Image: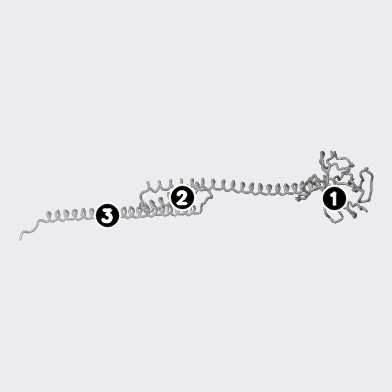
Amino acid sequence: MEREDPLEKLERKELEKKSNGGLKTIMIVMTVVAVALAAVLVYVWTSKNALVEDLNGEKQDLTEQILALQNDYEGLSSEYDSINAQLDSSREEIAQLVERVKKTEATNRTKIRQYEKELGTLRSIMRGYISQIDSLNTLNHRLTREAASARQEAAESKRKNEELSQQVETLTDRVNVGSVLKARGLYAEAHNSSDKKTDRSGKVARLLVNLTLVENELATRGPVEVFVRVFDPDGNQIFDGKGTTFEFNGELLTATASREVDYQGEEIDLGIYVNNIPSFSKGVYTIEAYTAQSKLGTAELLLR
């Protein structure tokens, strides 16, 4: 076997030594690179997970805000159909927004930002609704108060009008009562054919009924007809043949005789003759005097 030259052996060992050193260096570098790459991968993975978690949190927060706004919209109502129609439209928009957010990945930041803007818009619209509803409610309350006040004033006016009407009616009744003609000094005389007074029934040719219409400033001025009704001792009414009728208290009566006078509110004396009576009987005759509005009185005449 050929012996190796010592010098060559030494050179070979040196080469092996250098080769092993380079290999170790390469192994060290590769190890360092691998560790660094692993650290980078771990950092990237951790950062990505943190970002995704943050984005999921933003999406969850956005969803909760939309749901809260949706709940606020459900609590809004108005007495006006036009506003309720607008509220229904906004509620539909919110429901659609909720569904779109659910279907969108949290990593789609463009969409998430768009939805955040839509949420802000819907909030602004809701504030407008609240302001409008408050204004209308305030107006409605004011109008309700004004209507109640108007009703109260109307009721008070009605009450006063009724009181005034009652007063007018009372005064009218008093005036009507006060305006009724009255008479005094009602009496009757029997006259013979020579127009002299007599109480002998066989001599009587006619009767004269006398009375005085008293002064009355409230009474109606103008023509007034005074009616006389005469009843014989048996209670039968006697007639002069003219058959003059008049209405008194809703009843149609026939006068024995009548006379029209011009009454001007001052006292006036008058006499009414009862003529054309065939004969008179002994006894007490009853005489009643009327106007169309009142009974003036009753008198009696005794014939022998």
Q: Position of residue 204 (x, y in %)?
A: 91, 48
Q: Mark 1: which secondary structure?
A: strand
**Which residue: 16% across, 53% down?**
15
Q: Position of residue 115 (x, y in %)?
A: 41, 48
Give amino acid for label 1: Val
Q: Is residue 280 left or right of residue 251?
A: right
Which mark is on residue 88?
2
**Which residue: 5% across, 59% down?**
2
Give amino acid for label 2: Asp
Which mark is on residue 230?
1
Report how far apart the C-alphas of labels 3 and 1 lie in the structure: 153 Å
Q: Position of residue 12 (x, y in %)?
A: 14, 55
Q: Quadrant of the N terminus?
A: bottom left
Give amino acid for label 3: Ala
Asked whether residue 178 appears in the rendered view, the answer is no
Label pair 1/2, CB-CB below 8 angstroms? no
Residue toward you, 197 or 156: 197
For marks 3 and 1 on the same chain, the one whose residue lies earlier in the sequence: 3
Q: In the picture shown, does residue 11 fall above or below 128?
A: below
For marks 2 and 3 on the same chain, the one whose residue lies earlier in the sequence: 3
Which mark is on residue 286?
none
Report how far apart the C-alphas of labels 1 and 2 lie in the structure: 93 Å
Q: Mark 3: which secondary structure?
A: helix
For marks 1 and 2 on the same chain, the one whose residue lies earlier in the sequence: 2
Which mark is on residue 34?
3
Circle 1 residues within 10 Å: few <14, some 14–19, many ≥20: many
